[in-house]
Amino acid sequence: MSAYIVRRLLWMPPILLAVAFITLVLGLYGPGDPVQVLLGQHSNPDVIARVRALWGLDQPFYVQYGKYIWNVLHLDFGESFRFRGQPIADLVFGKIWISMQLATVAMVLSLVVGIPIGILAAFKRATWIDNVAIGFTLLGISTPTFVMAPIFQWVLVRQLHVLPTSGWEGIWSVKIIMPAIILGIGPIAAIARQTRVNIIEVLGQEYVRVAHAKGLTQRIIVLRHILKNAMIPVFTLVGFMVADLPAGALITELIFGVPGIGPFALDAIFSRDYPVIMATTLVVAFSYVVVNLLVDIAYTFLDPRIRYA
Amino acid sequence: MLKTNEETGITFEKESQPHSPWRDAWRRLARNRVALASLIFLAVVLLVGILAPWIAPYSYSTQNLSITQQAPSGAHWLGTDSFGRDLLSRIMWGSRTAFLVATVVVSVSFFLGIFFGAIAGYYGRWVDTAIMRFSDFLFAFPGLLLAILLAATLRPSIVEWTRQIEGSIGMPGLSRTGLVDYLVVFLALSTLGWAGLARLVRGQVLSLKEKDFVEAARALGASPLRIIWRHILPNTIGVLLVAVSMGMGGAIGGESVLSFVGLGIKPPNPSWGAMINEEYGFWRTHAHLVFVPGGVVALVIFAFNFLGDGLNDAFNPRAEEGV
């Protein structure tokens, strides 16, 4: 197993280098000339040439790539076109911190709600409770955020007047309730679905029958034999969701005015702030790759049956 | 395993009809009421989209600023939007956009995904490694982020490209028709779509190529292409159909997300996602302008997912139990 982990770790640098490569290519050759965008269309050619030389944009691509990687390793992402004088790293990490807070609340919510729904549906299989749960999970998985959000806003804000429409004041403010619910609905549904399927599968296993035959109490069987085994795939699912949440929160953050990484990146795209676009992409992709790797590795510890050769 | 009729003592009154796998699958699908209802619903929405130029009561783009944001009435069944455009007509035309995008994206993804997945699975070795590592890179980005990044960075190149085409075929104004928007969405979503499919097909091919019937075909001297095309791929059809259904729903969702954030289809061209974005500021006072397009997107995506589930049960009956 340690060989597997070492191999996976060795894979990380090439993947991250490729991510940086794609990002840099998209940044340099994709959306037009950054210098032109910065200086405007009718600027002096001499000035343009000087700025290009100043930023090293006149150098061959591999030099720029090497420099960029070197700087990024020192957490230097260059300077934003819009926010002068502030290191991009500070900006990006500040925004990610906000997104992570929202994502954490949503994730806790989805575990606390999703797992019990899945357990209940599995033990009440083929009853109306199960059917309601299945219907809910299907709705939750396939309803787009921008359909779910206005319904919640309309009911909770306009009709019931119980919550504010939008805004962000940290995790202890009531303003987080709605975005956390909206962001959590997909994961709640997915976790409930996965929990239900796993428990139903485990219920049919011989060791559960053996446990009953041994005369163990229902409590022990459910906790030690059923839940413990059924929760392993759920854990993986949760891991992948954690990796996906900050980037997936874009629509929710837009609608509820949460100043997280999503709206920040979108803003940068619209104003063609390349250094910021590239930094955001790199940081988000980096954390995504790392979290996915950690989940894979943790999985091998949780379930000894899994052995990656 | 199964006992013969002699052993069990069961005799059949008459020989049962020979069943083709397609007929069996169709019968199982038709018994699934939710899947069948979804199929009919999607057919209706698709038909409305195809016939939109003839059956839509108004133009999707004509503005009338004296009748903005009207409630549903006899003249405008779903009311009018912030520019006085007929909401029903825009929804009908929006179906065109959604199905066009989904069809193109799913076709391109399937072509690329089946091609790369099949050769990766069949040839193995460095071909497999190269293709799978490349798909790893695509998966290293969160999907939505990559789609947005691609849509944003592809646009200038595509604008440039359509300008060149304009010049060469003598059709000025082509780059301003919204064609660019469609191409951007096609490219961004197809780039994302094929990799997952390639993995799916690769897995299927890997397990099928060890089967005896493939061995037999190889022994008879069939070429690799023929083995893949005639012997392996037909056996993956059930899995692929499920992926088509889910993929259509996914592409429609992707298009509406891109359009919602302003990087996809742009008004006045009709897109459900862009319509929600345009009217979102009015959810307090004119909620139906948000709920109607939103409801339609959601229903179409549900329907594709339900249909996918139904197809899964119909084509892979052994996987049905318990799940």
Image (cartoon, rainbow, N blue to C red):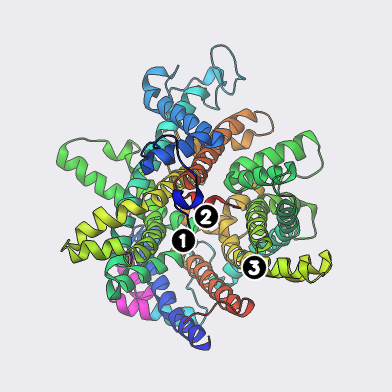
Give the residue number, with chain letter if any, for mark 3. Answer: A235
Q: Please indicate whether residue B118 sits to the left or right of residue A199 in the image.
A: left
Numbered disc in front, either 1 or 3 = 3
Dot label at residue A267: 2
Expressed as whole percent of the image width and height from the top left, the position of residue A67 reads 39, 80
For mark 3, name the chain: A
Relative to the observer, which residue lies in front, A77 or B7? B7
Going from N to C along the chain, the mark reached first, 1 or 3, is 3
Relative to the observer, which residue lies in front, B157 or A198? A198
Q: Would you place residue B80 above or below residue B164 in this image?
A: above
Relative to the observer, which residue lies in front, B138 or B64? B138
- Identity, as a three-letter code, of the amino acid under mark 3: Phe
What distance separates the C-alpha of mark 2 from that of mark 1? 8 Å
Q: Residue at x 68, y 43 (%)?
A: A131
Q: Please indicate whether residue A244 sits to the left or right of residue B176 in the image.
A: right
- Identity, as a three-letter code, of the amino acid under mark 1: Asp
Dot 3 surroundings within 10 Å: few (below 14), some, or many (20 or more)? Answer: some
For mark 2, name the chain: A
For mark 1, name the chain: A
Q: Is residue A65 magenta?
A: yes
Expressed as whole percent of the image width and height from the top left, the position of residue A195 reads 67, 59
